[in-house]
Image: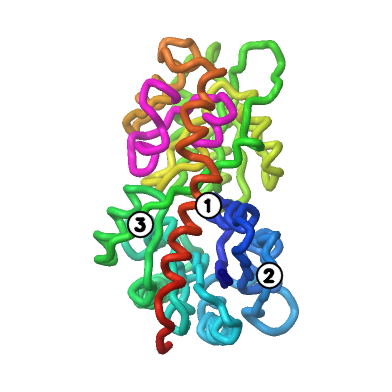
């Protein structure tokens, strides 16, 4: 089976899913990768979004000329031309099926409306800027009122393209039951759940120093919807004598929000360590030596960080929302708490002092190893692609 895989994802969990799939497909499945090249002058440089392991990789330059930083609004104006070229290359490549993942600028890619072979779209979430009011830009979040207005208009237009692209896909896949419910509510379409997996050879318990682990770790982009500010305030509510340090591991970053988090931490006496752009092996080491991983993102579609942490033998404390309810087994490998400073602080303390009575660190990995393995996820994705490839070609 010849698969044309398209994506233009930023660093994060969704890109991990694509990379793991390409690295783990069985023999007989040939994957060619297609993506956009922003000349490393965008918010998410091309080099940080590269997927290795494909048989061939084809890129289309999103804009001509030398690299310089361009806003998503400017880059969005160049999407139609670039997507037409991507679609042309895929249509002429003799592929059995197109496996399409989102674009960080527009979300569901417009190439879906132009392809002539069967298409499978993996939605890691709905386009939150279209369907979640708290996710949208607000006056004051951009430097000028005109800038905010342009952003809102661009979001509206991209939202229209997103809905058309989702409608054009033959099959929808998604990562969780929660995401499937959101897809049905927002797009009116059913999606098949094929949850991503984790690399249990990488994310596994590591040798740690013998002292009792006290640190708290948060993994994910430093952005308002990830709500690191809530974690800082929860730690500040813990008595200073018992308060653990906080380690933030991230790639994506909203600098204004990062400054807000660090100022709040300094004001309230919370010690913060930052690790940016580190290798997965380092992430696994930090999980292993931490006492607890805290998950406070708003309406997180799944929560791969929960699974990675548990696989490393470190329990989690997560807000009782969205995908965390699927990845965290309450009272076994973690705690689910209300979204409040007090509830999050109490949950962290319960894990630190052992009153949570969770599974031992030696047994924690067993609670996720089979259900959430890469092997199971990749097999499920391949099965759907094979079913789709049997359909007839179509007019673009």
Q: Earlier in the sequence, mark 3 or mark 2?
A: 2
Location of residue 57 (image quadrant): bottom right
Q: Is residue 60 above or below residue 20?
A: below
Determine whether the residue tagged by mark 1 lies in a helix, strand or loop.
helix
Residue that label 1 marks: 378
Tag 3 residue: 192
**Magenta segment, which residues?**
306-333
How many angstroms separate mark 3 from mark 2 (CA)? 36 Å
Q: Quadrant of the C terminus?
A: bottom left
Classify mark 3: helix, strand or loop.
Answer: strand
Q: Position of residue 308 (x, y in %)?
A: 55, 36
- The residue lying at 65 percent from left, 34 percent from top is 284
Q: Nearer the viewer, residue 236 or 294?
A: 294
> Which mark is on residue 90?
none
Quick check: is 309 in the magenta stretch?
yes
Q: For the residue labelled by badge 2, is the local secondary structure a helix, a strand or a loop?
A: loop
Seen as rendered, the residue at the extreme bottom is 395
Q: Nearer the viewer, residue 100 or 270?
A: 100
């Amino acid at each position: 089976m010849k698969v044309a895989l398209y994506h233009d994802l930023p660093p994060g969990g969704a890109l991990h899913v694509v990379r793991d799939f390409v690295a783990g497909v069985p023999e007989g499945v040939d994957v060619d990768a297609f993506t956009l090249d922003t000349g490393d002058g965008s918010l998410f440089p091309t080099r940080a979004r590269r997927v290795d392991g494909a048989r061939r990789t084809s890129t289309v330059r999103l804009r001509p000329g030398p690299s310089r930083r361009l806003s998503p609004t400017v880059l969005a104006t160049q999407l139609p031309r670039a997507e037409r070229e991507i679609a042309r290359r895929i249509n002429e490549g003799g592929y059995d099926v197109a496996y399409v993942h989102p674009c960080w600028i527009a979300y569901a890619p417009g190439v879906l409306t132009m392809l002539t072979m069967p298409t499978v779209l993996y939605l890691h979430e709905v386009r939150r800027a279209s369907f979640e009011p708290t996710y949208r830009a607000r006056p004051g979040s951009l430097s000028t009122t005109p800038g905010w207005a342009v952003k809102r208009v661009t979001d509206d237009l991209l939202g229209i393209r997103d809905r058309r692209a989702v409608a054009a896909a033959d099959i929808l896949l998604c990562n969780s039951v929660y995401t499937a419910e959101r897809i049905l509510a927002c797009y009116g379409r059913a999606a098949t759940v094929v949850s991503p997996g984790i690399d249990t050879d990488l994310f596994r318990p590591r040798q740690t120093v013998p002292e009792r682990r006290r640190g708290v770790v948060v993994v994910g982009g430093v952005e308002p919807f990830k709500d690191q500010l809530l974690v800082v305030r929860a730690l500040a509510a813990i008595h200073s004598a018992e308060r653990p340090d906080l380690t933030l591991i991230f790639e994506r970053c909203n600098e204004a929000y990062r400054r807000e988090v660090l100022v709040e931490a300094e004001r309230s006496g919370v010690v913060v360590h930052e690790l940016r752009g580190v290798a997965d092996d380092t992430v696994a080491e930090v999980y292993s030596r931490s006492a607890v991983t805290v998950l406070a993102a708003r309406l997180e579609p799944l929560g791969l960080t929960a699974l990675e942490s548990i696989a490393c033998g470190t329990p989690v404390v997560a807000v009782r929302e969205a995908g965390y309810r699927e990845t965290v087994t309450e009272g076994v490998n973690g705690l689910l708490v209300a979204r409040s400073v007090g509830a999050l602080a109490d949950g962290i303390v319960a894990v630190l002092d052992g009153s949570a009575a969770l599974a031992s660190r030696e047994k924690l990995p067993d609670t996720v190893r089979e259900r959430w393995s890469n092997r199971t996820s990749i097999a499920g994705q391949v099965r759907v692609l094979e079913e789709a490839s049997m359909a007839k070609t179509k007019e673009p």
